[in-house]
Amino acid sequence: MDRMIFVNLPRRDAAVTDAFYAALGFEKNEMFSDENATSWKLSEQILVMSLNEDFYNSFLVNGDKASFGEGTKQMLNAISAESTEEVDQFVANATANGGAVYRPAKADAPGMYSAAIADPDGHVWEIVYMDMSAWAEGNASS
């Protein structure tokens, strides 16, 4: 059995958050979506669960509550891109739809190009293009 990964993220405003992820091209998964949550399909095995704050908190114990990243970051989600152009387009779509540039696009290492955006709730998404042949060549030990 292939494991599934559910990335659970709290949200403040369902309409704003849903519009943001739809604009990025994430596919809505109706099976796991209702008035408390919207499920966004990244692949057959990876779903982003955008949860209303109270619903998100219902999964937590010991008085823990949702955090929206003001001043701290607990997690950096990263997804792959097929080109540097896709990285740039992802950032453009994010900023045009309520997101913000968290880290501008840059060449990180030989064959790597990435950027990071924050969604309307402050959750950070990095998008990375990796040319494996250039990366391997640039990082080969002598």
Image: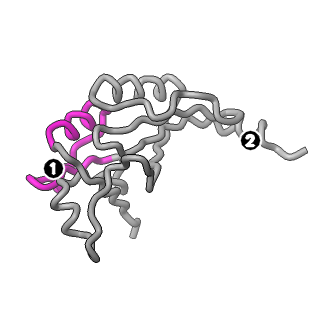
Q: Which residue lies furthest to the front in this view?
A: 71
**Tag 1 near tag 2, CB within 8 Å:** no
Q: What residue is shown at x 35% (from left), y 46% (from top)?
A: 42
Q: What residue is shown at x 34% (from left), y 29% (from top)?
A: 94
At which x and y percent is residue 27?
Answer: 26, 41
Above or below, 103 against 89 in this view is: below
Q: Does the magenta stretch include residue 27?
A: yes
> Which span of residues is magenta-colored?
14-41
At which x and y percent is residue 58?
Answer: 19, 68
Secondary structure of the residue carrying tag 1 is: helix
Residue situated in front as seen by the camera: 127 or 71: 71
Left or right: residue 99 compared with residue 106: left
Which residue is under mark 2? 136
Residue situated in front as seen by the camera: 52 or 23: 52
Q: In which quarter of the image is the C terminus?
A: top right
**Residue type for callout 1:** Glu
**Residue type for callout 2:** Ala
* Image mark for residue 30: 1
Left or right: residue 110 compared with residue 9: right
Q: Is residue 21 magenta?
A: yes
Left or right: residue 25 compared with residue 53: right
At which x and y percent is residue 133?
Answer: 70, 37
Left or right: residue 105 compared with residue 74: right
